[in-house]
Amino acid sequence: MNMTQQELFKAFESLPTEAQRQALNFIAFLQQTYAPATSKSQKTEIDWTNDPFIGMWQERQDIEDSTTWVRNSRNSEWSQGNDKSKHH
């Protein structure tokens, strides 16, 4: 079905108000669904070099090797979670 912009607009205007609202919502949905991937990645891009999250534990004296500490914490928590699910 090929319509000119004018025909499309006339068809839209002939719809009841609720149907026009639904059509606009559907168009917004399609725009979001089919938006170029580059625009999505640009919106969520983070400047990690200046993010305060990076290095937030660098002054902690109780965690000399944070990688080992995180790995051990995860292993401990995850193994406890698995043990609990096995007993139920």
Image (cartoon, rainbow, N blue to C red):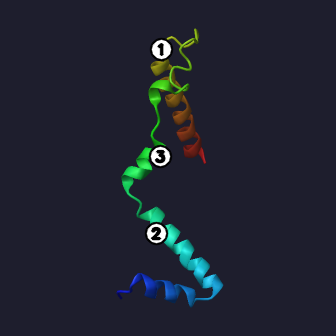
Label 3 amino acid?
Lys
- Report if the CB atoms under discs 1 and 3 are less than 8 Å apart: no
**Residue that carries the numbered disc 2 in the rendered image:** 30
Q: Earlier in the sequence, mark 1 or mark 3?
A: 3
Of label 3 and label 2, which has the lower sequence position? 2
Q: Residue at x 57, y 11 (%)?
A: 59
Which one is nearer the viewer's eye here, 71 or 23? Answer: 23
- Residue 24: image location, x then y, percent: 55, 74
Q: Where does residue 51 sit, x and y in percent of width and height?
A: 52, 27
Q: Residues within 10 Å of mark 1 (few under 14, many from 20)?
A: few
| Local secondary structure at mark 1 | loop
Label 1 or label 3, whichever lies nearer to me, is 3
Whether residue 65 is situated above or below residue 85 in the rendered picture: above
Residue type at mark 2 is Leu
Q: Residues within 10 Å of mark 2 (few under 14, many from 20)?
A: few
Residue ID for mark 3? 43
Q: CA distance from mark 1 to mark 3?
A: 34 Å
Q: Label 3 to label 2, Cα distance in Å?
A: 18 Å
Q: Residue furthest right?
A: 17
Residue placed at 45% from the left, 85% from the top?
6
Residue pictured at 52% horizontal, 34% vertical: 79
| Cα–Cα span, label 1 and label 2 | 48 Å
